[in-house]
Image (cartoon, grey):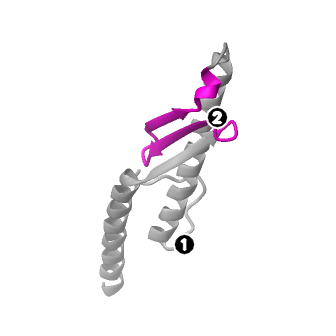
Amino acid sequence: MTNFSQMLKKAQEMQAKMADMQASLLDMKIAGAAGAGMVNVTLNGKGDLLSLKIDPNLLDGEEAEVVEDLIIAAHKDARRKLEERTQEEMGKVTGGMGLPPGFKLPF
């Protein structure tokens, strides 16, 4: 019965660590850029867009389609970085439990 109680204790510790990690992810800010830094976005840990900066030179003329594409590319860049950072933080919490790729916690 001792092994079960130790396993339960470890599960509770991991759950507490997961809660802490999730809270820290919410405070995280990840930046993404496109067009050699002409478009920049910042996301929070949930992937919500917090800010958007566009170089004023892009807004001269009729380049709206280019600007729209760069905004999308910058957002994708920030999302990719966020996912990488989240996986790194998850690895710290799970202690190398070997969760399968794409496995997301909480369930």
Q: Is residue 107 left or right of residue 41?
A: left
Q: Which mark is residue 86?
A: none
Is tag 2's residue or tag 1's residue first in the polypeptide sequence? 2
Residue that extends furthest to the bottom in the rendered view of this protein: 2
Q: Position of residue 42 (x, y in %)?
A: 49, 42
- The residue depicted at 56 percent of the width and 39 percent of the height is 40
* Quadrant location of the N terminus in the rendered image: bottom left
Q: Is residue 24 above or below residue 97?
A: above
Q: Is residue 22 above or below residue 68?
A: below
Is residue 105 part of the magenta span, yes or no? no
Q: Is residue 61 above or below residue 76?
A: above
Residue that extends furthest to the top in the rendered view of this protein: 62
Disc 2 vs disc 1: which is toward the camera? Answer: 2
Q: Amino acid at mark 2?
A: Ala
Q: Residues within 10 Å of mark 2 (few under 14, many from 20)?
A: some
Secondary structure of the residue carrying numbered label 2: helix
- The residue depicted at 38 percent of the width and 62 percent of the height is 21
Secondary structure of the residue carrying numbered label 1: loop
Q: Position of residue 54 (x, y in %)?
A: 56, 31
**In the figure, residue 74 lies in which quadrant?**
top right
Residues drawn in magenta? 34-59
Is residue 56 part of the magenta span, yes or no? yes
Q: Which mark is residue 96?
A: 1
- The residue depicted at 43 percent of the width and 49 percent of the height is 45
**Gap in Å between the C-alphas at discs 2 and 1?**
32 Å
Q: Amino acid at mark 1?
A: Gly
Q: Position of residue 86 (x, y in %)?
A: 50, 56
Q: Which residue is mark 2?
A: 73
Q: Residues within 10 Å of mark 1 (few under 14, many from 20)?
A: few
Q: Is residue 25 above or below residue 8?
A: above
